[in-house]
Image: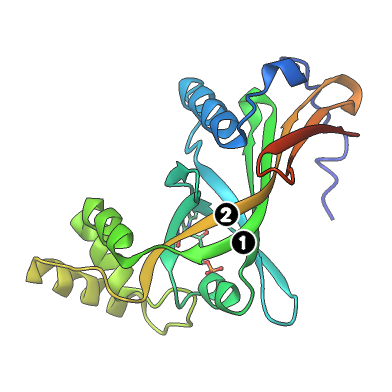
Amino acid sequence: MSDAFLGLRSEYASRILAPELLDADPYRQLSIWLEEALDASIVEPHAMALATADAEGQPSVRMVLLRGIADDGLRFYTNYASRKGQDLAANPRASICLWWGLLERQVRVEGTVHRLDPAESDAYFALRPLASRAASVASPQSREIGSFDDLVESMERLIEGGDVPRPPHWGGYRLVPHSFEFWQGRPARLHDRFLYRPTEEGGWEVVRLAP
Ligand SMILES: Cc1cc2nc3c(=O)[nH]c(=O)nc-3n(C[C@H](O)[C@H](O)[C@H](O)COP(=O)(O)O)c2cc1C
């Protein structure tokens, strides 16, 4: 067993987080941090781990791309028949986690997932390059396949055909959050953590969590 990581210890000391530095609206706070991650030239700053669980409660997690932030939820796109799609059909609760190492920041969001209206999925699908559209039609995501060459062949046939409309099994979801947590790394593991939770009046309150 490798112990190469045993002595690896980064001290997080570049920033602090405090209530007066947080926007009252967690969606705006997430947008601000994403923009700062973009400005810091972080690779794929919108990549996030998406955790789902199946009907038996077995969790699974994978990366997806955050494609939109709006007051009615955080958008991502995938194959509805994939493992995550099947999990979400059985159990719509999910959580996401973003980590920007350069900024020593983590964001966690928990909530309930809903499929987007087909028109919104169509609009996003139309923005994708032809090869990506063809790949999402050709690939039975998460299923066992015998041959990579067959996959490439069916994708190429679709590309030759020219027009590739969105198939019904591919589209978007919005995660409607019931909590957000913003985490800033601090020295000696005494990190700053702030949880946004809903108030009875329909707003958000912010509380500090122990690291
Ligand atoms: C950085 C990154 C971004 C990804 N973005 C997406 C995405 O937006 N949608 C998607 O379906 N898969 C995306 N993937 C692939 C997924 O991680 C995963 O392999 C795939 O969705 C199948 O997951 P599942 O079998 O759990 O459904 C991404 C992978 C990485 C590493």
Horizontal arrangement in the rendering, residue 141 relative to residue 206 (left or right) = left
Viewer-side residue, 91 vs 23: 23
Asked if the beta carbon under badge 1 is closer than 8 A to the nearest atom of ligand 1, the reply is no
**Residue at image x 62%, y 35%?**
26
Residue 36 x/y as whole percent: 53, 22
Return the residue found at the far left: 161
Residue 112 badge: 1
> For mark 1, does the 10 Å Cα neighbourhood hold few (<14), some (14 to 19), or many (20 or more) residues?
some
Contact flag, marks 1 and 2 (Cβ < 8 Å):
yes
The amino acid at mark 1 is Thr
Residue 18 x/y as whole percent: 77, 19
**Residue at image x 76%, y 32%?**
206
**Residue at image x 15%, y 74%?**
157
Q: Is residue 156 at least partly visible in the picture?
A: yes
Reading the image, the residue beneath label 2 is: 176
Under circle 1, the secondary element is strand
Quadrant hosting residue 87: bottom right
> For mark 2, does the 10 Å Cα neighbourhood hold few (<14), some (14 to 19), or many (20 or more) residues?
many
